[in-house]
Image (cartoon, grey):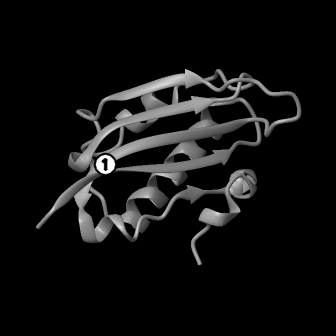
Amino acid sequence: MVWRVQAIRGATTVSENSKEAIQEAVTELLDELENHNQIEPGQIISTTFSVTRDLDAIFPAAIARQRPNWNNVPLLDVQQMHVEGSLERCIRFLIHVNMPETQAKKIVHTYLRGAKNLRPDWQKA
């Protein structure tokens, strides 16, 4: 079996800048990522989360680190560059995963809530 490193993108939005709202959104986003891509945390090479400047109640990486088997995944939080008129209260991720080449052809990029319009071409059927 041939394995490849693949990048998976995703994003979501939150209704407010609170720990609870961010935790709910990040959990939903990562649940969707794992369910639709059949990946295990042990396959994840690294994960970078970015948040818009209006979100600072909690780090998304702190939420991810609490998930089963995510404690050894390298995680990083950064602030998304601000562009006037861009989507507000948005959390994005870029995850690098080691996966079988056959599985790599079936990647589902996860865009939820208000972030669905960021990449309509990547929406699952």
Q: Residue furthest left?
A: 1
Q: Is residue 110 above or below residue 61?
A: below
Q: Secondary structure at mark 1?
A: strand
Q: Residue furthest bottom?
A: 125
Residue 81 on image: x %, y % = 69, 24
Q: Amino acid at mark 1?
A: Val
How many numbered marks, from 0 up?
A: 1
- Residue under the point 31% across and 48% down: 97
Could you tell me which quadrant the C terminus lies in?
A: bottom right
For residue 92, what is the image quadrant?
A: top right
Q: Which residue is mark 1?
A: 97
Q: Is residue 41 above or below residue 59?
A: below
- Residue under the point 60% across and 47% down: 11
Q: Residues within 10 Å of mark 1 (few under 14, many from 20)?
A: many
- Residue under the point 65% across and 65% down: 121
Q: Is residue 9 left or right of residue 125?
A: left
- Residue under the point 38% across and 58% down: 34
Residue 18 on image: x %, y % = 68, 30
Q: Is residue 67 left or right of residue 61?
A: left
Q: Depth check: give the residue in front, 87 or 5.
A: 5
Residue 26 on image: x %, y % = 54, 43
Q: Residue furthest right?
A: 85
Q: Is residue 108 left or right of residue 83?
A: left
Could you tell me which quadrant the N terminus lies in?
A: bottom left
For residue 102, what is the image quadrant?
A: bottom left
Q: Is residue 64 above or below residue 34?
A: above
Residue 15 on image: x %, y % = 76, 42
